[in-house]
Image (cartoon, helix red, strand yellow):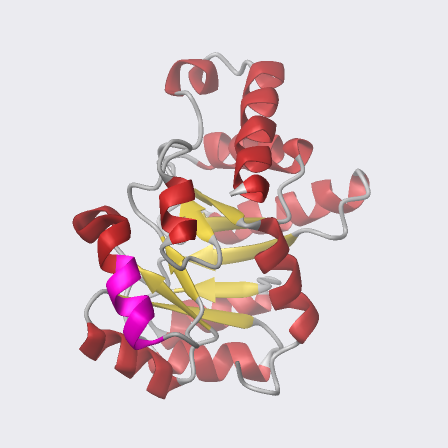
Amino acid sequence: MADSIPQQRWAVLRAARLIPVLRYQDADTALYAAQVALRAGCRGIELTWTIPGVLDVLRSLRAEAERIGRTDVLIGVGTVLDAEQARSALEAGADFLVAPGVVPSLVELAGAAGALSMLGAFTPTEIIAAKAAGADVVKIFPADTGGPGHLAAVKAVFPDTLFCPTGGVTRENMAAYFRSGADIVGMGSNLFDKARLAARDTEALVAALQATLKDAAAA
């Protein structure tokens, strides 16, 4: 990791073990899901750029976190595809940026703002490119295409690289990813029960997510 990147931010994410990756078609659902993640005790939360009005959601979530005393949480923006999006996310207060592929400008902008950067890769060539760009973390995406076996294979070649598999990670299989070399995992559509989310069953959602976080901590 580059010396200019705040070590404490990475320490928070690594201790979190699991980052909710929230990708919804409306801002209200995204904000609600993020609020559930806050209540459950998540230390890192990723809001994808594909959420309508994602930067307003980020600001609202930050305000909610401060209101309830969750100043320890890191809020990031994912699915960042270019410098303009990266700059806008950082100006809105993003603590980390995530791209599905290698976007070198994201790393430069994040570093200048004291934020963390995570670049997506799948093949060894892409991992080399992400590392050459200076990414703090390499996101193996989509993780379920190769599964834990693929992660173990690339970890053997890049033992000093910090990996975050995302895409198809579940409560049931995340331990296999950790055993294969994941430092943290990203969990998206598998994070919440869809019926409970639609019903806004907050207590059940919080309890289930806390159980998932407990499993992640033990993995």
Position of residue 193 relative to residue 86, above or below, is above
User: Where residue 154 sits in the image (x, y, percent)?
Assistant: 27, 68
Estimate the x, y position of residue 27 in percent, counting from the top left.
46, 37
At 57% from the left edge and 84% from the top edge, which residue is drawn? 112
Q: Which residue does the image show at 80% across and 41% down from the upper left?
A: 67
Percent across and percent down for residue 135 are 43, 77
Query: Does residue 98 belong to the magenta stretch?
Result: no
Return the residue nearer the eye: 219 or 109.
219
Q: Is residue 100 above or below residue 192?
A: below
Q: Is residue 52 among the parts visible in the rendering?
A: no
Quick one: 72 or 219, which is closer to the camera? 219
Q: Nearer the viewer, residue 53 or 42?
A: 42
Q: Residue at x 58, y 72 (%)?
A: 115
Choose top left, top right, bottom left or bottom right for residue 122: bottom left
Q: Is residue 177 above or below residue 6?
A: above
> In the rendered structure, which segment of residues is drawn in magenta?
151-158
**Relative side of 190 to 10, left or right:** left
Question: Most prominent secondary structure in the magenta stretch?
Answer: helix
Q: Is residue 201 visible?
A: yes
Does 153 appear in magenta?
yes
Q: Is residue 82 left or right of residue 9?
A: left
The residue depicted at 58 percent of the width and 59 percent of the height is 14
Vertical side of 101 occupied by 125: above or below = below
| Rendering coords of residue 101 (x, y %) | 27, 68
